[in-house]
Image (cartoon, coloured by chain):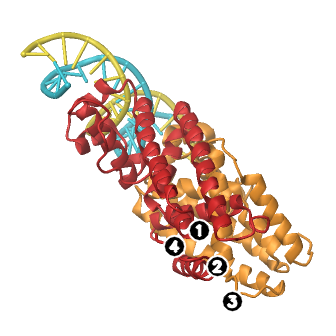
Chain colours: A red, B orange, C cyan, D yellow
DNA sequence: GTCTATAAAGCGATAGAC
DNA sequence: GTCTATCGCTTTATAGAC
């Protein structure tokens, strides 16, 4: 999930604007300060509205989390579909997986989900869809680059690179990046040696 | 960090037993329910002592977190040293990295660290030591298995496998394991084909 | 739809008896 | 070292005026 900048208003001119601001604020706060910073007061502060309005628009915090997660998830799926719309390539695949902001947000939502079962189901359903979509893209990329998928299956490429992106995001949270540059450099080099150039 | 079972008492027979129970309870609670469940009252409940004793033994929650983290970290480093004491092998390396409990605990401590700067420094210092120790072990294993390290550097092997272990732990938190078996199966197969057998 | 006011509960932390 | 009691604060959530 990205930083969730500007997005389309579902319907009408500026209906539910406050509601959107609250959802935006939730995603921003989660991305910037982590789930420990999530309170109605902080959300209201960031959104620029009274915190009681959070309760007016959402019956509970869990409802708010689910709606915020859905927005982030939809943005991610849309971005993946957009990137996958062009020609499949390992380089593009690597680029998708390197979205640090999305990794961070997912970690925070999973932490929140430990205390909100309904959110957990929502996340699991999304994770399954997203992984399947990424897998399809990885498979297409490997095929196009003529890399034998019985030697390195697409799923293995997917989980190893996704894990690496997640690890880097996690390390960075504590200001620790030992080995990141060396590993990314090796991957870039490997891509240069084993793939055919394609515009990114 | 493992499940922190029995550990040595620093000195004396059963001095500071309550203190130890509090630290144990903190690690258990963190591993089982995540950092959102950490309160002095819940800790006291799990430890079987009045929650006010947490304040008697620890000036602040941050102090408690740091002590709990140190215990977990020391256990991890000791376990790594123990495993590394034998002959280096990629299979052993993979085994070390597959400790799901440790991955989970680290995620929780990093989340806590976002609100406790002193804890963050503690974690960063440990992470650096642990990664260096793992890297040395990975390097020795690759050398012993006669795998060219200029083709696949030890650091790359380290971060990819650590990332995978972390990803699996993260997925499991939301009850989602798509691709885990396939990926672990491929790694096992790769190890069988590219390494010489050694007792684990 | 947004405001003020407040309820009900939980939190970390402290004081003082024993 | 452990207990009871409590302070002061923050939290989610609700009630009712406008």
Q: Which chain carries label 2?
A: A
Q: Name the residue under label 4.
A: A198
Please name which of the two marks, 3 or 4, marks the residue nearer to the observer.
4
Q: Mark 1 points at which residue?
A: A90
The C terminus of chain B sits in image quarter: bottom right
Q: Name the residue under label 2.
A: A194
Q: Name the residue under label 3.
A: B150
Tell me which residue sits at (20%, 41%) in the image: A48
Percent x, y of residue A38? 37, 43
Q: Which chain carries label 4?
A: A
Label 1 element class: helix
Label 3 element class: loop
Label 4 element class: loop
Label 2 vs label 3: CA separation?
Answer: 16 Å
Q: Badge 2 local density, few (<14 within 10 Å), some, or many (20+)?
A: few
Percent x, y of residue B83? 79, 72
Q: Badge 1 local density, few (<14 within 10 Å), some, or many (20+)?
A: many
Pick whichever of labels 4 and 1 is earlier in the sequence: 1
């Amino acid at each position: 999930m990205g930083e969730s900048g500007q997005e389309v208003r579902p319907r009408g001119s500026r209906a539910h604007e406050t509601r959107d601001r609250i959802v935006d604020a939730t995603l921003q706060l989660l991305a910037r300060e982590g789930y420990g910073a999530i309170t109605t007061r902080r959300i209201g502060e960031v959104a620029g509205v009274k915190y009681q309005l959070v309760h007016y628009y959402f019956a509970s915090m869990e409802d708010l989390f689910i709606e915020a997660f859905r927005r982030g998830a939809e943005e991610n799926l849309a971005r993946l579909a957009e990137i996958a719309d062009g020609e499949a390539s390992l380089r593009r695949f690597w680029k998708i997986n390197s979205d640090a902001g999305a990794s961070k947000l997912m970690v925070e939502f999973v932490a929140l989900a430990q205390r909100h079962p309904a959110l957990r189901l929502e996340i699991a359903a999304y994770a399954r869809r997203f992984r399947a979509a990424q897998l399809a893209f990885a498979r297409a990329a490997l095929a196009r680059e003529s890399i034998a998928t019985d030697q390195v299956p697409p799923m293995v490429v997917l989980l190893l690179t996704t894990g690496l992106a997640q690890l880097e995001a996690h390390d960075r949270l504590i200001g620790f990046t030992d080995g990141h540059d060396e590993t990314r450099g090796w991957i870039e080099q490997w891509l240069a040696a084993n793939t055919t150039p394609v515009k990114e």
